[in-house]
Amino acid sequence: MHESFQKIDDLLKRGKTTEARLLLSKFKRTDIPKENWFQVAELYRRTQNPWGILYWLTKRVHPNPPMNPTATNQEKALYALGLSRIGAFTEAKALFSEINHKQVPIAPFYEALMYISQWDYIKAILPLKISLKESTLSDYQKKVIQLNLFAALVSTRNFLEANNEFENLLPKIKDIPVLLGNLYEIKAQLLFNNQDYETAEQFIDKSFQQLSDESNVYHLLNKKWKAILLKAKNSPLADSELTATKQLSIQMKQWEIGRDCDFYKAYFDRDDRLFFQVYWGTRFRSYRNTLKIKYNWKGELPKYWDWQGSETNSSASEEYLLSHSHLNPKLDLSSGLYSPVSSHELQQLPLLKGNSLKILQFLTTDFYSPFHLGELQEFLYADQYFNIETTPLKLREIIRKTRLKLKEHAIPLDIFIKNKQIALGFKEDITLRCYRKHPAKKDFPEWIQIQKLFINHSFSAKDIAQSLKISPRSARRLALKLLKEKRIIKQFSGINTRYCIKK
């Protein structure tokens, strides 16, 4: 067993991620002692597979039935990282908050990786620096942490400190191809940001020499920067190289690379419309802020964006998309109102509401990348923890019902689930009106009456039922609706539950 672990470790250090994943997939929980499950989960972390982490540690963190001893803090920290990688950030943060980094020296690094997965490099810097001070971590772990710190410093434009980290780290990793190749690629980013395009290209060439596996994401990253550098130098080949790299990124499921190809095309062409598309099609706020800074956008941003079908993955020209947009059916993702091609106006009544509308609102917060199931669970049920066995089934059922609604109303959209990721599909061209913040919900008769009756004192669901002359069940459902909309605040719990109007 130790030899197998060592072989996978060696493959990962040499950048042979595909081969390492293949060997890992042959491990079964029944064949590995429980005390070694953490080692397997850690290898899954290094292959960027969060579901592997959760699979190997869920019975340790959430044993059923509960038993002693429970999971170690080290196992909880890695499990929290796995949760963050599938979008279950609330539960992940709660687990990290329980762990003392003096007891689990690697925990700050895992927490930093959580922030990095949300493109929040500013918050990642401090835990990365804390990790580097931990004397119990291995030399290799510290080199990986220092490499991530270098990347965070470059991303936050702390160039002077970043250069110092580069000079410090370079001699330490000269014999580790995967780390050295990554270091050169990040150094090229720093030089690019300083508009030293010639030297940046030299470092990309050095990175290519270290990362020769064309099936590896690191190789694709270098191709992206090659294309971007062509664009920076006004090469006539630049646009075709960016398009080819974007198409390859889609094939390899490296969605962020495709997003970058669009952004840098917009940046160098000063194409505001393409910039707006990239901005509106990016779900992480910290990344959107970075895009604004890089593009040097000073003006107001649109309050909504009309996404024209699957334009982010389309080869159609901007002129074609704009000239044909009026022929598309339209769906407003705030109201749920829909207008088919045969109609010139929106339907008078919303065809979509409840979870069906919420799912579409969620899936249109990113035009490039699919979503993890954990992200949808957090969007719909932020107060519930992610159960690896039951949550996916519950979410799949909600998605199934939404697909039926779309089919029932002949809305040319579909929702796909593959490899535990969710994506919106287009059966034909359609215009989706997307909002970052959906307009406030209008008051409705029951709410107006509740405000008049209980503006100055607390009330229960029974009070609602008696005052509005509705059933107790309807009253409880109404109270839950008002809670979700944050119109009221819950006081106490159980049979003593009362509410008050939020002021």
Image (tube, rainbow, N blue to C red):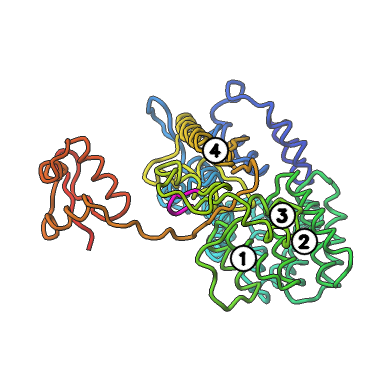
Please give the name of the residue rendered at 54% of the width and 38% of the height, measured from the top-left corner: 410
Q: SS at mark 4? A: loop
Q: Would you identify the image quadrant in which residue 226 lies?
A: bottom right
Question: Is residue 114 shown in magenta?
Answer: no
Q: Which one is in front in this view, the residue at disc 1 or the one at disc 2?
A: 1
Give the label on residue 250, or none. Answer: none
Q: Pointers 1 and 2 in contact (CB under 8 A)?
A: no
Give the label on residue 276, or none. Answer: 1
Give the label on residue 410, or none. Answer: 4
Cα distance between the residues tagged 1 and 3? 15 Å
Label located before the other in sequence (1 or 3): 3
Q: Which residue is mark 3?
A: 258
Label located before the other in sequence (1 or 2): 2
Q: Which one is in front in this view, the residue at disc 3 or the one at disc 2?
A: 3
Specify few, some or many for label 2: CA neighbours under 10 Å numbering under 14, 14-19, or 20 or more: many
Give left or right: position of 479 versus 304. left
